[in-house]
Amino acid sequence: MVPVLELRGSIPVGLAAGEPLWAVLAVSILGNLIPVPFIIICIRKIFLWLRKKSKHLETLVEKLEARGREKAKVVYKYKVLGLFLLVAIPLPGTGAWTGALVAALLDLRLKTAVPAIFAGVVTAGILMVIISYGVGALFL
C-alpha cells in the first residue's frame, strides 16, 4: 500500500488475485488506518526536520502543505463531516493519509479526527468493493 493508492489500489488488486472479499476489505482498511495517528501526531515535526535538510526537501514539504491546505477548505467548512467526505470519496488526492495531513494542518485532536477518518476509510473500502467486484459481492 502506498500513499497515492491506499485501499483504492489494494482492494482491486486483492480481488483480482482471488483473495477472499472480506479478508481483502479488512486488511485494506487496517493497512490504510495504521499510519493515521502517527501522521496526525508527527507530520509537522517531520516537515520541520525535512525543511532543515535541503532546499529540495523544503520545496517538497511546501507542495505537500499547499495540497493539504487546499483539501482543508472542505474540512474547515464542514468540520468532521468534511473530513469524513474527504476520506470516503475514493478519488485521487483523497484518502486517509490526506485526511490525516489535513487534520494535522487544522490542529484537529485525535479523538475528533480518527473516528471521522475511520468511518471514511470503511465507506471508501465498501465503495471500492462495489466498483471493483459489483454490488453482489457485498452479500457473498
Image: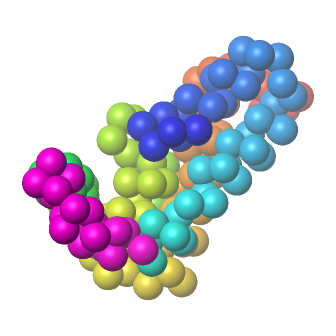
Residue sticking out furthest to the front: 53
What residue is shown at x 70% (from left), y 53% (from top)?
A: 30
Q: Which residue is nearer to you in this view: 39 or 130?
A: 39
Q: How many marks?
A: 0
Q: Quick check: is 38 in the magenta stretch?
A: no
Name the quadrant containing residue 130.
top right
- The front one of 130 and 67 is 67
Residue 105 placement, left or right of 21: left
Q: Is residue 97 left or right of residue 37?
A: left
Q: Nearer the viewer, residue 82 or 14?
A: 14
Instruction: Using the rendered view, name the quadrant where residue 140 is placed.
Output: top right
Q: x, y percentage for residue 74?
A: 25, 60
Question: Left of 5 or right of it: where is 19?
Answer: right
Res. 83 in view: no
Q: Residue at x 82, y 17 (%)?
A: 18
Residue 57 magenta-highlighted: yes
Q: Is residue 133 depicted above or below 52 in this figure?
A: above
Q: Main secondary structure of the magenta part?
A: helix
Q: Is residue 89 above or below residue 107?
A: above
> Residue 109: which quarter of the image?
bottom left
